[in-house]
Image (cartoon, grey):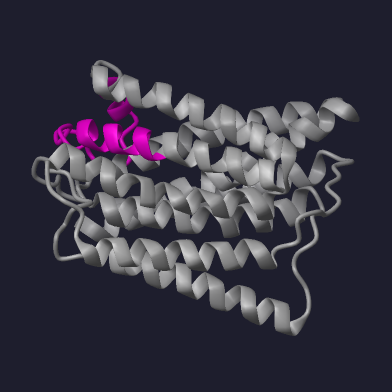
Amino acid sequence: MTAAISVALISAFFFALAATLQQREAGLATEIGASDPRLLWRLAHRPWWLAGIVADVLAAALHIVALSFGTIAVVQPVGVTGLLFAIPMVAILRRTPVPRRDVAAALVVLIGLALFLALTPGQTQSTIERATPVVFVIVGTVALLGGLMALAHRSPGRVRAVVLAAGGGIAFGVVAVFARALLLLIERPHPAAIVVAAIGIAVLVCVGYLMLQHAYRAGHFAASLATAVVIDPPAAIIAGALTLHESLPHGLVRMSLILACAAIVTAGIALLVRSPSHVLTLSAGPEPDADQ
């Protein structure tokens, strides 16, 4: 469990670096409409955005290593620390100090996350025997993401950013589950499940990446990143239970404590997002209209 958390922390650092670099570039692409796939082509010509891709690849590779050491319920929540890493990164880019309020909020997040991990089962049986559950999860996820894209297209500003970021968080949470599934299938091969999981990863990575870039482009970096990292763990835990039969925490007392810890983490993130310093918001161009 310690190895899984340690590697996941390093992965979260590179994810934060990627998000910071990509938001800086995506915010300049103001001529593309909401959810337009051409955005990725435009960004592919920007060196700093490509540097973010390299950081994302490193983050993904390390995340897979972490998943080989621990379960979804242990690894995914650590991704919340990506927001904490992003604070000093953006402060450096803006050449501004990190406010004490944001430092205090970051400590609240860390305390809540530490307590959450202490209450989460470190070991649980993960199995995948059929491709059917994977297909159901893919279809359900794609349908949900399609609905979120439609909603984002009709939403303005911050609401659009949050909706798109939620879709990105859900997509990558499910991708993590399928990545762990492939690791398990290496030991006990099931051809159909391998093919379906690989297709699911390819589709959801593309859709999730597109939604995150559009969320960053909306100019509300703090709200976007916070939404993505908070939505990712519950989406992954639910998908892990459906696909890998990973057991969820049980017992009224334990569940109550876990929910309390989740509330602490959410409260800390809310403080970061609402910080009057706007230290997490990089400058960007004007927001495009929702009907573009």
From the top left corner, tell me how far across and down residue 28 is, in percent. 15, 33
249 or 197, which is in the foreground?
A: 249
Residue 235 image point, x, y percent = 59, 56
Q: Please name the residue shown 66% across and 32% down the image.
A: 65
Instruction: Tell me where residue 217 appears, x and y as whole percent.
Output: 23, 41
Q: Is residue 32 above or below residue 101?
A: above
| Residue projecting furthest to the left | 286
Q: Is residue 187 left or right of residue 198?
A: right
Question: Residues in magenta?
Answer: 16-42
With respect to residue 57, does 242 lie above or below? below
282 is higher (above) or lower (below) than 36: below
Say which residue appears at 19% left-offset and 50% top-offset: 281
The C terminus lies in quadrant: top left
76 left or right of 69 in image: left
- Say whether residue 111 is magenta: no
Where on the picture, by quarter, is residue 50?
top left
- Can residue 108 be seen here? The reply is yes
